[in-house]
Image (cartoon, grey):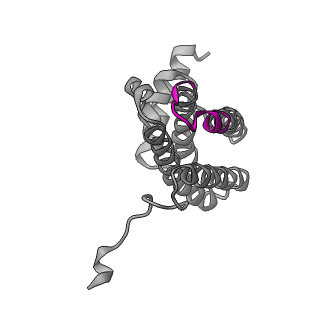
């Protein structure tokens, strides 16, 4: 009979293998971690956003926070449905997330908080796009379908937040090719 410690050691060993040769499951673990860290950041922004736009931004940030928690929960269930192990501790979320938290952010302007949030959603999309391709390659349609839905949610959040900044949806997010001017 395998002990709890042996099971967890096997999980860590497999996670290390999967993260060095990315699989849809491993990439989705990163997405789940990003969603969890993003939830913390959205809550911080909701609590600390200041300025004349606060009354308009708090409901938007609250809605995004609730959606993020729901999406993370659904994604964790889906990973388990797919026979994967979902990251489930704060240490794992920190290890697998590509988003960073900062206590100093609570003192930033509303525009800075919204810009950080836009950048975070855009970073999440990089992992989602990669995971969609891996899920399709591995013939995992339920996972691919959810990830496509998540990509759509993020795109909508980016557009809404960019509009608060007076930007178009993709302003400052897509790399521009300066060589085209030659």
Residue furthest bottom as drawn: 182
Q: In which quarter of the image is residue 145?
A: bottom right
Q: Please, what is the dominant secondary structure of the magenta stretch?
A: helix
Q: Residue at x 71, y 34 (%)?
A: 70
Residue reaching furthest to the front: 52
Total marks placed: 0
Q: Nearer the viewer, residue 12 or 94?
A: 94
Residue 83 in view of the camera: no
Question: Would you say residue 62 sits in the magenta stretch?
Answer: no
Of 129 and 109, which appears nearest the observer? 109
User: Does residue 137 show up?
Assistant: yes
Residue, x 65% and y 51% (percent of image)?
147
**Looking at the image, which residue is at 60% across and 57% down?**
132
Q: Quadrant of residue 140?
A: bottom right
Q: Residue 130 placed where, x, y %?
A: 52, 56
Q: Where is residue 8 in the image (x, y as percent from the top left)?
A: 52, 22
Q: Reply above or below: 11 against 119.
A: above
Which residue is at the front of the view, 96 or 124?
124
Q: Is residue 147 left or right of residue 113?
A: right
Residue 179, above or below 173: below
> x and y percent of residue 56 in the render?
64, 38
- Start and end of the magenta stretch? 47-60
Identify the residue at horizontal 68%, vertical 35% (top origin).
59
Image side of residue 8 versus residue 78, left or right = left
Is the N terminus in the top left, top right, bottom left or bottom right quadrant? Answer: top right
> Looking at the rendering, in which quadrant would you find the C terminus?
bottom left
Q: Residue 82, relative to residue 13: is it above or below?
A: below
Image location (x, y in percent) of residue 95: 42, 31
């Amino acid at each position: 009979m395998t002990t709890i410690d042996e099971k967890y050691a096997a999980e860590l060993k497999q996670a290390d293998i999967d993260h060095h040769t990315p699989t849809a499951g491993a990439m989705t673990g990163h997405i789940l971690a990003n969603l969890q860290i993003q939830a913390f950041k959205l809550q911080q922004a909701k609590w600390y956003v200041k300025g004349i736009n606060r009354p308009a931004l708090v409901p938007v940030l609250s809605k995004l926070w609730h959606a993020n928690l729901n999406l993370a929960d659904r994604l964790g269930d889906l990973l388990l449905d797919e026979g994967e192990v979902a990251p489930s501790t704060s240490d794992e979320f920190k290890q697998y997330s590509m988003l960073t938290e900062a206590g100093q952010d609570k003192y930033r302007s509303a525009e800075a908080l919204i810009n950080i949030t836009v950048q975070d959603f855009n970073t999440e999309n990089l992992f989602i796009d990669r995971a969609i391709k891996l899920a399709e390659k591995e013939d995992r349609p339920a996972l691919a379908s959810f990830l496509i839905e998540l990509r759509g949610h993020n795109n909508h959040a980016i557009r809404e937040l960019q509009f608060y900044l007076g930007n178009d949806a993709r302003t400052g997010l897509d790399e521009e090719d300066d060589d085209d001017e030659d």
